Image: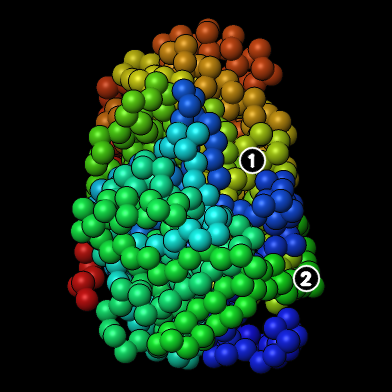
Amino acid sequence: MGLNDSEYTLLTELLGRDPSYTELGMFAVMWSEHCGYKYSRPVLNRFSKYKEAMEGEGLENAGVVPLGDGLGITMKVESHNHPSYVEPYQGAATGVGGIIRDILTMGARPVAMLNSLRFGPIEDGKAPEAIVRKNRYLFDHVVEGIAGYGNCVGVPTVGGEVNFHPNYSGNPLVNAMCVGVLRLDEVTTAAASGVGNPVIYLGSSTGRDGIHGATFASEAFGEDSEAKRPNVQIGDPFAEKQVIEATLEALATGAIVAIQDMGAAGLTCSTVEMASKGGVGMEINLDLVPMRENDMSGYELMLSESQERMMAVATKGREQEVIDVFHKWGVHAVVVGYVTDGQILRVSRHGEVIAELDPKLLTDHCPVYHSAQNEPESFRKAASFDPTLLPRVDLTDALLKLLSSPDITSKRFVFQQYDQQVQTQTVRSSGSADAAVIAPAGAKKGFAVKLDGNARWTKAHPLRGGQLAVVESARNVACTGARPVAVTDGLNFGNPTYPEVYWQFAEAVEGIASASEALDTPVISGNVSFYNESELGEIPPTPMIGMVGVLDDPTKSLGLVPRLGDTLALISTGQTVSSHQGLGASAFLVDVVGTEDGYPEAPDLVGEKRLCAVLAKLASQEAIASAHDVSDGGIAVALAEMAIAAGLGINAALPTIGLEVSQLFGEFQGNVVVSTDNLAKVREIAESQNLLVIELGEVTSEPHLNLSGGFGDLNWTLLELEDAYENAIPRIMGAYELA
């Protein structure tokens, strides 16, 4: 069950007796890291909104930020890593379903999905053949699961990212993010209230799938990982679509007092958390729960994580209004209990009380652990990285290698499987802009959203990696013309009992918190996933940042495609370059040189905030036609991506900074390439905010990328760039016969 001896002793002391078998299972899931955050809670207090929630009334399912005109945006990211390893299609699919319901229980209509995925190497020769084949299988079926669920449920999948590293081979990462729109005066709560109010079970029947899914997600993989297949839930996107419409219609009646998704820990989580948040008790009769098999025990019913289920508290006397709505949509709606006085949750099965306890014992008394922290020797050694000692490489070939690297290359193989236009609110999506843009129906304003992270940077320098994840997501959102306003985070790390892993976690969280504060983009929701490790070791530390920004006029949003004849310019925070020359922890170092070393460049947090504001202003005044940030692979990759997206040529003279290779492939922060037909206006606006503007060159009809600088003159045909960028993953996956 995942409890240690001291935790069992503590729960018996809290109860004043030995627990029943069902109670023991309830404690096990609620005190798991997945639900109880026992290792992460002390560190997460660094996020001011989280700290306020913990010290106040507790967290709701997701945070909310204003959009304007009485509307709000709510968003959250969740991981489904372990389920996606043992059953990739259903693991990924139910990750999508679960995060949609988290948004739904805020009273919001889900309008956009994003995902952030990590796998082991998929290229021949990068790992033993059996591991490569397994990684391809996981990659293919995870994407299939996301598409299969998301496309059917009718929520567009508008953005995401995919990266690869050897240490994800035994433990892939599947993080799903959902964004919803709601009226600010109609935000719902999960806090049960009103003694005598009926508790209503809503949605699909309960089966035996997913039992102990929360504890499964809170332990490392072992030899019995494949035997954990029954811990993975089975999704039904068509049932989820019915639940979405029924829930929104039922909420509109005003008869629902509180509502909660039956996610991790199922009936246990929903009854315990709703009663605890409301400071009330509940009487629950499991005999009334719709079930797939009538011989299910109370333990199984309380711990099942069957999908597409919700729990609601209705106003006494109005429960039939809720039930009628759900029945109209062909969905179960059954009163299974009542809110009671006295803060005791009492659960019965076949007339016998199988659990009777104070729900706050499970929510407020989970033990909290402070692990030791240890800065690894590899971190100290990386400080002495000297880029001047790197071997000389063919710079022309290096760009083609980077463009065909699975980390950088086009992810069209992935996003062409997703329905990006369902709901007809998507203005910009994968491949066309640095972030997705949504224009919600009936709203004057729109929003841009991005899910981003870079484990390579975070592994090399966790503090900077956390900061860079935030500033790059913000920069991506700003490149569409939006003002970044809020963050949701997905924090994926190894075993928190290891001092080096806990140090990585604490440093990365500090980086995220400091950057979020500097950019005025508070962390309003999030998720922590620990115990991501296998016999290959722990995964690279992987914080993923979901950023949302507000667009006053979504019709003025920007993509990354430049116009023919436009001038290209670099807008930069102009920070000093370190001795690592932008090559520390760079894609160039990994994919061309074949090593991991050095630190990523530190961001100028104040400058990044100014850069985001300037980009939004330039877009609103229509002074620029496109914007694309400089990130993995440096400015050479950014310019190549713009040329490929436009199907046009580019002539550019690059700034002479440091080493020749740094000028092309250095991953300097705070840099965005824009195209414009009014460079004077761009200079005026950007320089007034102490930003540098460097003219690079022009967009031409000649199908070539020509770059000049301290490295001399380099030339690539558009055809060879497109081949490297667009065909790398199809070639890799085409050599693989789908299992």
157 to 197, vertically: above or below: above
The amino acid sitting under disc 1 is Pro
Task: Choose the circle earlier in sequence order: 2 or 1.
Answer: 2
Q: Nearer the viewer, residue 5 or 711?
A: 5
Q: Position of residue 88 (x, y in %)?
A: 34, 71
Residue 203: which disc? none
Judge left or right: residue 729 versus residue 339: left
Q: Is residue 714 visible?
A: no
Q: Which secondary structure, mark 2?
A: loop
The amino acid sitting under disc 2 is His
Q: Position of residue 292 (x, y in %)?
A: 27, 79
Q: Position of residue 170 (x, y in %)?
A: 46, 77
Q: Is residue 578 visible?
A: yes
At label 1, counting other C-alpha atoms closer than 10 Å, the crowd grade (few under 14, some 14-19, many 20 or more) is many
- Indicate the quadrant containing the C terminus: top left, top right, bottom left or bottom right: bottom left
Judge left or right: residue 698 versus residue 542: left
* CA gap, disc 2 and disc 1: 25 Å
Q: Which secondary structure, mark 1?
A: loop
Residue lying at 37% horizontally and 41% vertically, measured from the top left: 252
Judge left or right: residue 19 versus residue 249: right
Displayed quadrant of residue 644: top left
Judge left or right: residue 694 versus residue 74: right
Q: Position of residue 166 (x, y in %)?
A: 49, 70
* Residue designated by label 2: 370
* Residue designated by label 1: 522
